[in-house]
Image: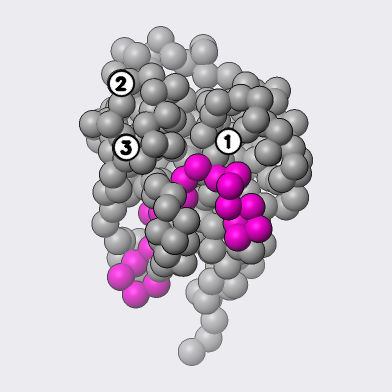
């Protein structure tokens, strides 16, 4: 079984500030016993080829991907050709991408209360998604993953555990174990077939607040209920 992270950003991200490079992400993942990690910048697919040799030296498989904004909603497109993935703008485009190429489409943080999350669009387009993300930022008392878990069970879709990594400290509490050989195609195929197990531990409220304060604008924090008086 491979320990896998399928939602991670690096300093190459064109939208979010990320304070570490691909190599530093690889080092941290290797230290925590990961076997594979997908780089998923916002709306740009990083060419991982220049980084593969270093990743191999740390026994990490790099998987290309992108967190694409589709009609204003985020979706993880994993192991598709870069130009094709970056060209997806509508859910119709996503359907065409899936028909032409054999990658993996994941619904990331679908029911978190922010505008870029899929929300009802996941219900409108269930056949376009191969798996659903259980996001690492949750506690025993505050958990926006519950609807995603229920949706995945109702639709018979696999759940994958992701950190949505914007800071290295986000690695290591939630991940996927995938029954596959260590290459991107096999990992994606195994997840699509359901050969994946979730491993996750809730974090403390204090850790959640610290992470959100670091990676999210204050307006999003307010919408999640933090920063309000009383």
- The residue under label 3 is 195
Distance between the Cα atoms at labels 3 and 2? Answer: 12 Å
- The residue under label 1 is 77
Residue farthest toward the bottom in the current orientation of the protein: 230
Image location (x, y in percent) of residue 118 = 62, 57
Q: Is residue 147 above or below residue 184?
A: below
Q: Is residue 63 above or below residue 15?
A: above
Q: Is residue 168 above or below residue 108?
A: above
How many C-alpha atoms fall within 10 Å of the one at disc 2: few (<14), some, or many (≥20)?
A: few
Residue at 43% across / 22% down in the picture?
Answer: 184
Q: Is residue 89 or residue 61 the one in the foreground?
A: 89
Residue 85 is drawn in which quadrant?
Answer: top right
Residue at 31% across / 61% down in the picture?
Answer: 203
- Element on which disc 2 rests: loop
Q: Is residue 189 or residue 175 the one in the foreground?
A: 189
Image location (x, y in percent) of residue 69 = 69, 45
In the rendered view, does 76 fall on the left or right side of 140? right
Can you see residue 63? yes
In the rendered view, does 9 fall on the left or right side of 2? right
Marked residue nearer the N-terminal end (1 or 2): 1
In the image, the segment drawn in magenta is 122-142
- The residue under label 2 is 181
Q: Which-is-in-front pick, marks 3 and 1? A: 3
Q: Is residue 47 above or below residue 34?
A: above
């Amino acid at each position: 079984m491979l320990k896998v992270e399928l939602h991670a950003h690096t300093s190459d991200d064109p939208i979010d500030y990320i304070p570490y490079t691909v190599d530093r992400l690889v080092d941290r993942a290797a230290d925590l016993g990961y076997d594979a990690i997908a780089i998923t910048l916002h709306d740009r697919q990083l060419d991982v080829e220049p980084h593969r040799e270093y990743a191999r030296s740390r026994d990490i498989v790099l998987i290309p991907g992108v967190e694409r904004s589709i009609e204003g909603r985020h979706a993880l497109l994993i192991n598709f050709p870069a130009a094709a993935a970056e060209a997806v703008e509508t859910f119709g485009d996503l359907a065409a991408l899936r028909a032409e190429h054999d990658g993996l489409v994941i619904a990331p943080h679908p029911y978190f209360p922010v505008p870029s999350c899929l929300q009802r669009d996941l219900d409108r387009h269930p056949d376009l998604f191969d798996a659903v993300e259980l996001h690492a930022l949750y506690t025993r008392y505050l958990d926006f993953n519950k609807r995603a878990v229920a949706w995945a069970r109702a639709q018979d879709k696999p759940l994958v555990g992701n950190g949505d990594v914007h800071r290295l400290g986000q690695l290591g509490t939630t991940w996927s174990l995938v029954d596959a050989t260590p290459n991107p195609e096999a990992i994606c195929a195994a997840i699509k077939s359901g050969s994946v197990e979730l491993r996750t531990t809730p974090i403390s409220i204090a850790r959640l607040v610290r992470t959100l304060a670091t990676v999210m604008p204050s307006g999003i924090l307010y919408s999640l209920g933090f920063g309000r008086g009383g």
